[in-house]
Amino acid sequence: MNETHWRVTFEIFRQKTGQPCHFDEYVMDVDPDEYVLDVVERIWAYNDRSLTFRHACHHSTCGACGMRVNSVEKLSCITPIREVARNGGKVRVEPLRNFPVLSDLVVDMGAFYLRLDDAKFSQVASLKDACLPFERKQQVREDGSYERLVDCLECGMCISACPVALTTPEYLGPGVLAAAQHAFHQSRDTSLLDLVDDQDGVWRCHSAYECTAVCPSNVDPGWRIMDLRKNILRHQISKIFSRRGQSR
Amino acid sequence: MYTSSKKPQEGTFLWLLKIIAGLLIIIILGIHFYVNHLVAPGGLLSYSNVLAYYQNPIIPIMEIIFLIFVVTHALLGLRSIVLDLNPSQAVLRWINIGFVLIGAIAVIYGTWLVFFVVAKGSGA
């Protein structure tokens, strides 16, 4: 084996509906610069056609291939083997946490997507609103007419990494809260604040910032949750003063 | 569709209280260290130094306020961790009562202790 040819053991999580889970091991000859998803695909193609996993774009745009690689949430299509293993080592591949496992590495993200709809998640935004407020703005026309896809890939990795999401399925989770913050930032729709002002909303967060750490797209859900708290507080204080103003 | 549960476990007020208490702990702790180590002549090196230090009326008040903020912040933090265990409403009610009792006992005992030290006077 040389620097361009490694032998790595892949431990793949396996579970079919109603059956107990286990790990299957596959010893693979790999190029350390190829990506984890490439090897998972090869395992499917040449070793086990019953292995199921999600993938689409292969360049970190679709967010479909989010998995836990050696217990850390990664987009497997942009995670080089060299980054997670060494020659003769092991790579453990598991499905995302905090989602029901449908089959092997495929999880059910239906509830997450429905909650994104509730949070009025918009896939596109004007360039002005697409970035984080403290980021350098991209070329923006005076009228803000350019639009782009928002950063969130809906990969669900933030929810998988969140230690609080592990405690209850009721928790909206960082991805949904970040979407709500973004929608509120664009629309100033206070019904979004009512949606997240809940013990299973922004108040559940323990500020672990694991969501921000694993986000492959710089959405920074942790910051957005704190920003929502600030806006809820501001909204509630302004409601108190507007009530007093009306009663006079 | 997600519907807000509006359960009273956690909300703006308790969060704000925790944040304000945390901020005040930092401020009072800074004053506490500054006064103890830099303002008190030669520092508080002996028991009699401490007794004399407590004769200044500002000090016991500051220590009691410090105690209240520490207890409040600590118990609110502990409570938010307990909430992750998803207790039922009935259990949470008892937990809340328990936390209030623990907080009250800690503050009452600490306040008594401060006054006990003050009552000893400056001579030892």
Image (tube, grey):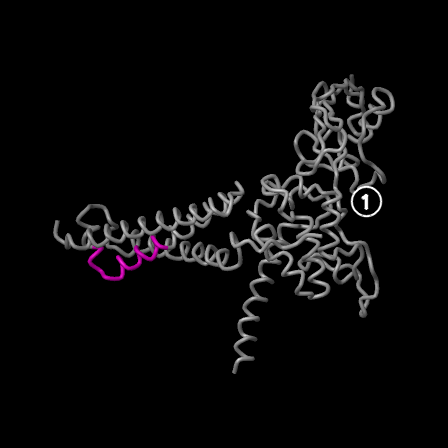
Q: Which secondary structure, mark 1?
A: loop
Q: Is residue A103 above or below residue B113?
A: above
Residue drawn 64% across the image and 44% down it: A211
Q: Nearer the viewer, residue A8 or A241?
A: A241
Residue A225: give x, y in percent of width and height: 62, 53
Image quarter (top left, top right, bottom left or bottom right) of the N terminus of chain A = top right
Image quadrant assignment for residue A235: bottom right
Query: Looking at the image, which residue is at 50% across and 44% down?
Result: B81
Would you identify the image quadrant in which residue A187 lies? bottom right
Tell whether position B60 is magenta.
Answer: yes
**Residue highlighted by disc 1:** A61
Q: Residue at x 76, y 27 (%)?
A: A16
Instruction: Characterize the local packing of mark 1: few (<14), some (14-19) or many (20 or more) Cα atoms within 10 angstroms.
Output: some
Q: Residue furthest front?
A: B90
The boundaries of the magenta stretch are B53-68
Given residues B66 and B52, the one toward you in this image is B66
Q: Amino acid at mark 1?
A: Thr
Q: Is residue B118 left or right of residue A26?
A: left
Q: Is residue A41 left or right of residue B123?
A: right
